Image: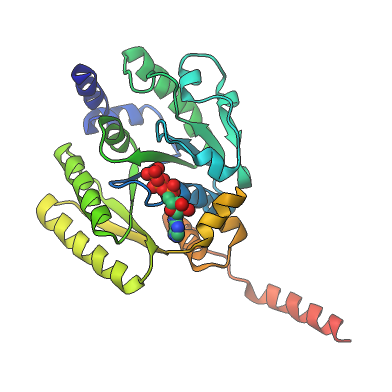
Amino acid sequence: MANQAAKLKEIVNEKNREAILKGMNSNARTIAVASGKGGVGKSTFTANFAYQLSKIGKKVLVIDSDIGMANLDILLGVQPSYDLGHLLRGECSLEDALVEGPAGIKLLSGITGDDSFINVQNKTVHKLMNIGAELEKDFDFVLIDLGAGASQNIISTILAAEELIMILTTEPTSIMDSYSLIKILSNHDYKRSVNILINQSEKKSQADKISKRMKKTVARYLELELDVLGIIAYDRNMSKAVHKQELFCEIYKNSDAAKEIERIAYQLTGEKKQRAGIKSYFFKMLGFLKKNN
Ligand SMILES: Nc1ncnc2c1ncn2[C@@H]1O[C@H](COP(=O)(O)OP(=O)(O)OP(=O)(O)O)[C@@H](O)[C@H]1O
C-alpha cells in the first residue's frame, strides 16, 4: 500500500500533472470540492453549483468520488447503473456510465465495488487519462465531489485537479480540520490558491471574521493564498429539498442561499448576469396595460 501511495504521488505531482494536462488540450475546468470535516455540505453544494452552472449554459459533469459514501445520485434524483469501476474494467461504455440529471447535468459515479480506482497500475492510469481526455472534449466544468478528510486518495485527486473549492462551516472543528487539510496539501507542494466557501452560515459577520482570520493564518504559516469564494446561509429548506429528491436551487430559487450559489457560478465563469433591461420593462408594461383595459 505504501508503495502504491508513493506511485500515485509521483503520478500526480505538480510537474507530471502539468505534463499530462499539456497533452490533453483541455477546455474543461476540473474543480475538486473537498472538506476537512464531513457533513459540511460538499455534495449539496456540488449538486446545486452544477445546476447553477448549467443554467448559465455551461456543460457540467459531476464525479462522485466519495468512495463508499457517494450520494450525489440521490441529490440529483438519478439512478446510475454503472460507475467508474465498470468503466475502467471495460464493462460499460463511457456513454453508459454517464447519467443525466436536472438541467442536463451529467453524473459519473466514482464508487467502485473493488479497488480499481485506488489500485494504481500504469494500465489503470492510462485508461483514466484516456477517459479524462474523452470527457474534457464534452464539458466546460468537471466537478469532483470528494469524501471528507485527507486520505492519500483525496490528496491525490486535489493535486490532480486544476482548482480546489474547500467547504467549511463556522464550527471550530470544521475550521481546524480545513486548516489541517491545507497544511497537508502544502506539505505536498501544493502552490495554487485555495478557494474556501463557508456553508451553513448563521451570521454573515461571523463568517466574514473567520474567513479573514483564516486567510491571514494560511498566508503567514503556509504561504498559500486563500480566496473566499462565498458565504452560503444556513437554510432548513436544503434538507426539505433532499427529502423531495429535488435540487434546492431549482425549487427555492429566490432564497439567499440559491442566489449566493448562482452568484458564485457567475463569478467563476466570468459571465455577466443578463439584466431584465428595457425590452423586458416594455413587455411588462404592455401586459399590464392590456390587463387593465
Ligand atoms: N446551507 C445549508 N443550510 C442548511 N443545511 C445544509 C446546507 N448545506 C448542506 N446542508 C445539510 O447538511 C447535511 C450534510 O450535507 P452533505 O451531505 O452535502 O455534506 P457532505 O459534506 O457532502 O457530507 P459527507 O462528508 O458525509 O460527504 C445535509 O443534511 C444537507 O441538507
> In the figure, 260 relative to 186: above or below?
below
Where does the image place residue 200, in percent across and percent down from the top left?
A: 40, 61
Which residue corresponds to the image point at 58% horizontal and 63% vertical from the top-left?
Answer: 253
Q: Residue at x 66, y 76 (%)?
A: 278
- The answer to which image quadrant residue 148 occupies is top left
Q: Quadrant of residue 213 in the image? A: bottom left
User: Which of 178/125 is in front?
Assistant: 178
The answer to whether residue 27 is above or below residue 222 is above
Residue 120 visible somewhere in the drawing: yes
Where is residue 103? Give x, y as percent: 62, 47
Q: Position of residue 173 (x, y in %)?
A: 24, 54
Asked whether the viewer can see residue 246, the reply is: no
Would residue 109 be found to the left or right of residue 193 on screen?
A: right
Query: Vertical placement of 266 versus 9: above or below?
Result: below
Position of the N terminus by quadrant: top left
x and y percentages locating residue 61 in the rendered image = 51, 39
Quadrant showing the C terminus: bottom right
User: Residue at coordinates 26% horizontally, 33% vertically from top-left?
Assistant: 151
Q: Is residue 256 left or right of residue 247?
A: left
Residue projecting furthest to the left: 221
Farthest residue to the bottom: give it: 293
Residue at 34% x, 44% y is 34
